[in-house]
Amino acid sequence: MTGNVLYTATATAKGGREGHIRSSDGVLEANLVVPKGLGGPGGAGTNPEQLFAAGYAACFEGAVRFAARQAGVKLGPDTQVTAHVGIGPREAGGFQIAVKLEPHLDGVDPTQAQDLVNTAHEKICPYSHATRGNVEVTIELV
């Protein structure tokens, strides 16, 4: 980064995957629960994978919308992005995540939609930049 930080989000976690999170402004606050798929009780609460999926989906849709504006493409009202974040063991030990993004670009033909998604992923989205080379990310237009 060039040092020109435009915004910094701050959040604190206490208690790990079975604790609580809170943003510094109090807008985001939630209990954390280990999902049943990871051997936990599940139940009312979120987890880091859900939070990452929500963040990536929102960021990626924003990047797609930015790419569309730059290309002069109008997106329909049902444009959305769904992110699936999976977690599992690494061969080298520990755990890793994998991401599948499912963008739906309402009212855009598939070829143009693919071009916009590629631009968003390769040039615009900070989540895509952060995960590149570290996390398997697949993108499938729906």
Image (spheres, helix red, strand yellow):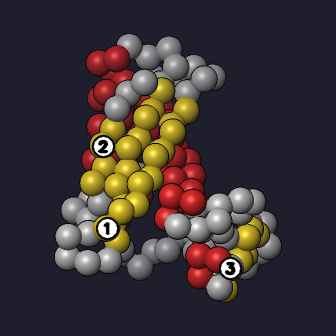
Q: Indicate left or right for 138 with 26 as reference.
A: left
State whether residue 32 is above or below residue 57: below
Q: Position of residue 31 (x, y in %)?
A: 73, 70
Identify the residue position indicated by label 1 in the image. 89
Residue 93 visible, this orientation: yes
Q: Position of residue 13 (x, y in %)?
A: 64, 81
Identify the residue position indicated by label 3 in the image. 19
Residue drawn at x 48%, y 45% as measured from the top left: 83
Residue drawn at x 71%, y 77% as measured from the top left: 20
Marks 1 and 2, how far apart at CA = 19 Å
In this rendering, the label closer to the viewer, 3 or 2: 3
First reached walking from the N terminus: tag 3 or tag 2:
3
In this rendering, the label closer to the viewer, 3 or 1: 1
Q: Secondary structure at mark 3?
A: loop
Label at residue 138: 2
Q: Residue furthest right?
A: 26
Q: Secondary structure at mark 2?
A: strand
Q: Amino acid at mark 2?
A: Thr
